[in-house]
Image (cartoon, rainbow, N blue to C red):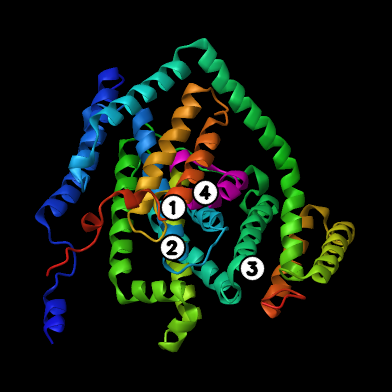
Amino acid sequence: MDKLLIAKSEPLWNTDKRIISLIGGLIVLLFALPHFGLNSFYLHLMIMIFMHAVMAQSWNVIAGFSGQISLGHGAFFGIGAYATSFLYVQYGISPWISIFLGMIVSGIAAILIGIPMLRLSGHYFAIATLLIGISFQIIFQRWEWVGAASGVWVPMTSGDSWLALQFHSSKMPYYYIFLVFFIITFFLVWLLSRSKLGYRLRAVRDDPQAALSLCINVSNYKIIAYVISAMIMAPMGSLFAQYILIIDPDRVFNIEISIIVLLITVLGGIGNVWGPIVGAAILIPISEYSRIYLGGTGGAVDLILYGLILMLICIFRPEGLISFFPKNILERKKQR
Amino acid sequence: MNHPAFGLIGVFLILLMAWIFSENKKAISIRTVLVCFALQVLIAVLVLYVPFGQNLLTGMSDLVITLLSYADVGINFALFAFVAVALGGFGSIIGCLYAGIIIGLVESLGGLLIDPSFKLLYVFAIYLLVVIFRPQGLFGRY
């Protein structure tokens, strides 16, 4: 009886004032950062970190929470990218609307892929998603209606335009847009991880048989996780398309996108809400800086480092870099 | 923003944060930290300013790029091998044989009879179709 009362009186999340002020301070710092005289390279770096953190978070939802290793997440990124740029070029629909259309389309695609494929287990599912990812690339490379292999060129507006989501004079607006999406996504996924749905997904990951015996509809929950994951991925594709203003199948459906989100999540900490931030904050600067110091082609130094770091992490810290932080910072305070 | 002092401030901020978040502050040996920091500076100087270090790094990078370009050629075969094993069912030897024959035939005949630019898609479609009706592959047991 005592234990029940204690459990009821436990706060829903970490109410430690220091932690809350730390997170609040970080958010304020991120909002203020562009005004400290960052040049456009640093803004680009931060934008890439935000984008990859959200993409990795999307993969984290399906692989970390519900335990299904998907190797075809680039497909949803590409759907998002094509949704905004193609609808804008063809029908003049504002990207702000088509971001949500892209989310809906990729959610539907996730349902259509998920219903037959999520029945598969382990390697079979991983290979199936890998093939679906490559298939999307091949189809879009040959599809004349959406520009085939030359892709879609978004016509530039003269000057900055919030309606068309294009900014040519400065990267600052992009920074804030990506930052807002980043904060919203992480907040929602954090809510998800604490909700009933989040706990059920983890039950499905840890032991599907046991979850089934507790009346958790395993296949439905897997599909729900897949749809959520796809709907997180799609807006990043849309925003990326608006950021670089030219997309082609080789870039937005690239298999490397599916791999990099996996690398970031595994490095940062798979199944942990904050893991993707740590992973992205470490991997993206490595690749951008090695690109600068070693010339245009980038060299393979970043790949060497990725491989090395990943091997060390897998051997010594399988739960990712996030595990270096003390547990009480990340989880709710135990009240005894 | 490009002043070197910013880098130093960053390094010390990270160390400070690590110290604040440390659960056992007494166990931190300042000597180890300093030696590791010196080692890092040494490596950075070697790589960024000494010609030998630069050559070493670019040489290593070129080596890996060469290796990767060879691997890129092979990856298409590896992908098909991967698909063939999954199509036949993991752990089944006879399944591998049949899956290999099916994939080879589908790829060549599909390219010949329908449209060669979608060659890969036919193979993928066969795999996905088989797996929808038989999740464990053609001859797999689990």
Mark in front: 4 vs 1: 1
Q: Residue at x 60, y 67 (%)?
A: A125
Amino acid type indicated by mark 4? Val
List x then y, in percent, for residue A7: 16, 77
Residue designated by label 4? A89
Residue A324, placed above or below residue A32 = below
Q: Which residues are magenta?
A: A243-266
Q: Which mark is residue A265?
A: 1
Residue designated by label 2? A64
Q: Nearer the viewer, residue B122 or B33?
A: B33
Mark 2 → mark 3, Cα distance in angstroms: 18 Å
Q: Secondary structure at mark 2?
A: helix
Mark 4 → mark 3, Cα distance in angstroms: 38 Å
- Which numbered disc, 4 or 2, marks the residue that appears first in the sequence? 2
List x then y, in percent, for residue A260: 51, 47
Q: Secondary structure at mark 3?
A: helix
User: Crowding near pointer 3: few (<14 within 10 Å), some, many (20+)?
Assistant: many
Asked whether residue A225 is drawn in magenta, I would say no
